[in-house]
Image (cartoon, rainbow, N blue to C red):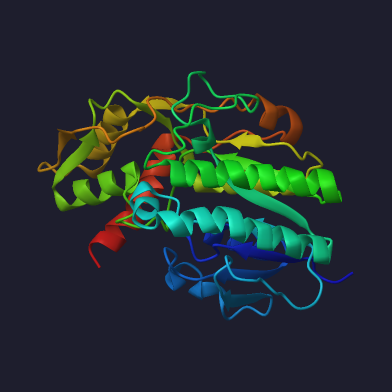
Amino acid sequence: MGRKKVLITGAAGFLGSHLCDRFVHEGFHVIGMDNLITGSMSNIEHLFALEHFEYYHHDVTKFVHVPGELDYILHFASPASPIDYLKMPIHTMKVGSLGTHNLLGLAKEKNARMLIASTSEVYGDPLEHPQKEDYWGNVNPIGPRGVYDEAKRFQEAMTMAYHRSHGLETRIVRIFNTYGPRMRIDDGRALPAFFSQAIRGEELTIFGDGSQTRSFCYVDDLVEGIYNLLLSDYALPVNIGNPDEISISEVAQEIVDLVANPKAKLSYRDLPMDDPKQRKPDISLAKQILGWEPKISRQMGLATTLDYFKKKVTQ
């Protein structure tokens, strides 16, 4: 038996690069694909010397061709932070629609199983708490965040259409807030901003009054959940995230205390339009189907992430 072959799009991004590491470690032949709009070669350059890793510089909104057999496709290409998708709204929509369609076509041609990276943003500013997979969401389709939210909702619908119409093996992961090494300093999300600001001794920028909540999952836990989902036989969406809910003000203070820079203080700004007030996954389905739940505490995960950001900020 030869090695299974997996294509990972968005391979040079935060999550994509960690997935490349995991699949190489599990003995797969990994093809990483990225156009480096938001990804960085530094995230995957350690893999280039390996016999069973190859890299294609390609934009998935264009026709995607991979020679030979292919067993799995993981579609993680997309701008994923507000600062990125507000700057690139049309490309964000195209990656979720045209990109997904191209990759589903490739999966059909190769008879490959395809897993798509969806998001908790499909729930919008939720009226149900915590969020379960059968909740349809509360999304403003024409608001500034709609380009990302609706791209992901369309992506799910297109994936299920291929599953139902063509019998394609598909998996859908709804990813909640994730953090860890390889996040971009300037990606606009809360934790990279807080770490960078605290290390520099700047004010930590909190939007709104800081009472809005998020649930932060360490990247290794997330990758474990995604790996288990891909190899499961469950085709409907599954939440993967950490249900340990915390307010933005509280996590900012935890980072101030951890960094221990006396100049770092909390600072409050106006809340952006359609910013969700609450985020907490119901992970009972992941526990039941995958036997998965997060193992890494926020205390441990934040400490590891701080080590990474200290090196990046001082470079």
* Towards the viewer: 67 or 247: 67
Give the percent coordinates (x, y) of residue 299: 39, 36
Residue at left offset 39%, top offset 58%: 88
Residue at left offset 43%, top offset 27%: 125
Give the percent coordinates (x, y) of residue 273: 31, 34
* Towards the viewer: 46 or 56: 56
Residue found at the far right of this picture: 1
Quarter of the image with the N terminus is bottom right
* Towards the viewer: 65 or 302: 65
Is residue 256 toward the left or the right of residue 6 in the image? left
The answer to whether any part of residue 127 appears in the image is: yes
Number of labelled discs?
Answer: 0
Is residue 2 toward the left or the right of residue 202 in the image? right
Quarter of the image with the C terminus is bottom left
Residue 92, compared with residue 288, is above or below; it is below
The answer to whether any part of residue 231 appears in the image is: no
Give the percent coordinates (x, y) of residue 163: 79, 46
Give the percent coordinates (x, y) of residue 141: 47, 37
Q: Quadrant of residue 18?
A: bottom right
Residue at left offset 79%, top offset 63%: 71
Is residue 216 toward the left or the right of residue 10 in the image? left
Residue 50, compared with residue 104, is above or below; it is below
Residue found at the far left of this picture: 263
